Image: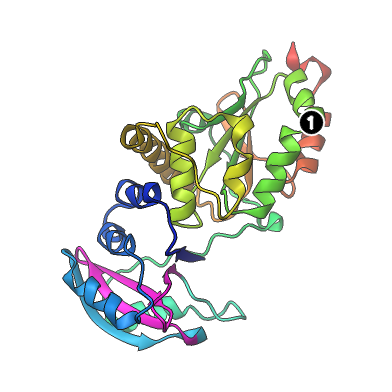
Amino acid sequence: MWRLHSPRRRRGGRLAVASLVGGALLAAAEAAAEPPAPGGYEQFLERLRQKPGITLIDTFDAPAGLKGVALRARGKPMILYLDPAGENLFLGLILDAGGQGNHTSDALARYFPGETVPAPAPATADPVAAPTHPGLAAAELRALTGIRQFPASGAAGRELFIVFDFACGHCQRLYAALAAPALAARLQAAGVGVTWLPVDFSGERTAFKAAVALGTTVGFDHLAPYFDRDWAPDVTGVEIYPAVDRGAKALAAIMQWVRGAALTAVPALYVTQGVTATPLAGPPTAAAVERWLESLPLSAAN
């Protein structure tokens, strides 16, 4: 999963980096808030050297013509990549085309031998990659701050939780399908509560969107523009520091739950009844939601 920092990022996005990225990533993210200059990657490397908390270890040639950088950010090992012109900075994994080799993990092992360096698996946005782990505690999902589409109204207390990423095309299609009047009416008629839980699998750009959506009162009906890759929330007139701070804390709690659930694919759909939450059977699509609705007893909303 690539993380691209665009030279044309909004000021609000730069503020969000300091709020959303913690630990080892914070110092590097602060440097990334000033994107590489067209004058070349050497100039950006020099700015990195001047950043408090960053120790530059070495540079190396990476796949696709990129320049790899091994560094420590507040003592933690990190690999990042720059294009030769110094116009774009990338954070994340580089895998070979066959999916068998992990160039980033190899670089971490080469420059930081003997250290425990977690290399997360790349998150996917493929419906066939639906989670298969067993049921989870429903109370943990209910404790998270999400974006509510409908509250549960049936006596059975059925709920649908949707974990998604604003950069995920499958998530965007699922949002459009569940927002459409026909399926939305069926969910309401069945008394199903629907809550959307954004994640930041795709990096800082979507993390900022998720924090704004969670920290403000944007509401489910107004999320469609957030799925546009080049769109940024309009924070004019918003007390952005408190809002992003609230949203960042809510996002951090969601991501902690995601790690505990070993979730690496979005969208992911969970249904609850009573004390248990289980993944919805089949690929996480609108069709799966419709099949689940059809399986509910007619008295579900009573």
Residue 17 at x, y percent in the picture? 34, 52
Q: In this view, does 47 lie to the left or right of 65?
A: left
Point 37% across, 65% down: residue: 118
- Vertical order, 8 against 145 (above or below): below
Q: Residue at x 56, y 81 (%)?
A: 96
Magenta extent: 65-92
- Disc tally is 1
Query: Relative to 154, does residue 91 appear above or below in the rendering?
Result: below
Give residue 212's position: percent from left, percent from top. 45, 38
Residue 86 belongs to the span the image colors magenta: yes
**Residue at 57% of width from left, 31% of height from top?**
276
Q: Is residue 180 left or right of residue 165?
A: right
Q: Residue 25 in the image: x percent, y percent?
A: 31, 60
Who is closer to the viewer here, 117 or 216?
216
Q: Which of 15 and 119 is in front in this view?
A: 15
Q: Out of 35 and 215, give the one closest to the viewer.
A: 35
Q: Which residue lies furthest to the top in this view?
A: 302
Answer above or below: position of 9 versus 255.
below
253 vs 230, left or right, is left
Task: Work out whether 21 lies above or below 226.
Answer: below
Disc 1 marks which amino acid? Leu
Q: Can residue 70 be seen in this view?
A: yes
Where, by quadrant of the figure, is residue 190 drawn?
Answer: top right
Looking at the figure, which quarter contains the C terminus? top right
Magenta-drawn stretch contains 192: no
**On the image, which quarter does residue 244 sit in?**
top left
Residue 113 makes an appearance in the image: no
Q: Is the magenta stretch mostly helix, strand or loop?
A: strand
Residue beneath disc 1: 183
| Residue at (31, 70) in percent of width and height | 78
